[in-house]
């Protein structure tokens, strides 16, 4: 196994462990306080700022999605990688980082364009990435904190445009 693959694997497994620990910690806090906010933003990300945590998760997600190209779509490894991609996507959503959401959107767009130009693109691979994107969108709209943060960012951006045109 090449050294790069070992490093990428260790990075991804470490992040999967971090997401699992973050969920466990958030669940413990939630059972004590009953406050749903314990699952989001800084309360979810124990060690890093949520934006950095989402950055690392997006980097790992990119590696996982690109490695799916090297795997037979019907292989159990492809299913395992899809599970990893789903867990990483959950981590991005629960970190509720605006930059994490923007990075995720660019990542999915890049991967879809990249795969569109690959000769080996199959329907099942396209369905894998599309299901990951739909999973993200569904969880995003089910997450009140994430929606609030994104709509706030859009509102700020539109107010800045209005202020710039009035001056």
Image (cartoon, rainbow, N blue to C red):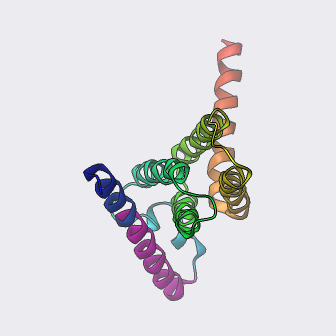
Q: Nearer the viewer, residue 139 or 158?
A: 139
The residue that appears at 38% across and 66% down in the rendered structure is 13
**Viewed as shown, does residue 129 lie left or right of 83?**
right
Residue 110 locus on image (x, y percent) = 59, 36
The residue that appears at 70% across and 14% down in the rendered structure is 165
Marker count (numbered): 0
Residue furthest to the top: 167
**Residue 39 is a magenta residue:** no
**Viewed as shown, does residue 112 lie left or right of 27?**
right
What span is colored magenta in the figure?
Answer: 14-34
Q: From the viewer's perspective, is residue 24 above or below residue 133?
A: below
**Residue 30 is a magenta residue:** yes
Q: From the viewer's perspective, is residue 126 above or below residue 112?
A: below
Q: Nearer the viewer, residue 32 or 114?
A: 114
The residue that appears at 65% across and 16% down in the rendered structure is 164
Q: Nearer the viewer, residue 165 or 109?
A: 109
Q: Main secondary structure of the magenta part?
A: helix
Asked where in the image residue 116 lies, by quadrant, the reply is: top right
Residue furthest to the left: 3
**Viewed as shown, does residue 41 lie left or right of 127?**
left
Residue 160 locus on image (x, y percent) = 64, 26
Residue 123 locus on image (x, y percent) = 74, 51
Which quadrant, please, contains the C terminus?
top right
Residue 67 locus on image (x, y percent) = 49, 51
Which quadrant, please, contains the N terminus?
bottom left
The residue that appears at 65% across and 44% down in the rendered structure is 152
């Amino acid at each position: 196994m090449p050294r790069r693959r070992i490093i990428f694997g260790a990075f991804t497994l470490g992040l999967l462990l971090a997401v699992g620990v973050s969920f466990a910690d958030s669940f413990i806090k939630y059972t004590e306080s009953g406050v749903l906010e314990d699952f989001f933003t800084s309360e979810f990300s124990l060690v890093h700022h949520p934006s950095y945590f989402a950055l690392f998760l997006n980097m790992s997600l990119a590696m996982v999605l690109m490695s799916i190209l090297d795997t037979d779509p019907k292989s159990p490894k492809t299913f395992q990688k899809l599970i990893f991609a789903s867990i990483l996507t959950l981590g991005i959503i629960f970190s509720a980082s605006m930059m994490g959401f923007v990075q995720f959107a660019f990542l999915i767009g890049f991967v879809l364009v990249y795969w569109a130009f690959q000769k080996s693109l199959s329907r099942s691979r396209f369905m894998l990435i599309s299901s990951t994107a739909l999973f993200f969108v569904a969880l995003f709209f089910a997450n009140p904190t994430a929606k609030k943060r994104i709509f706030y960012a859009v509102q700020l951006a539109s107010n800045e445009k209005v202020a710039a045109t009035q001056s």
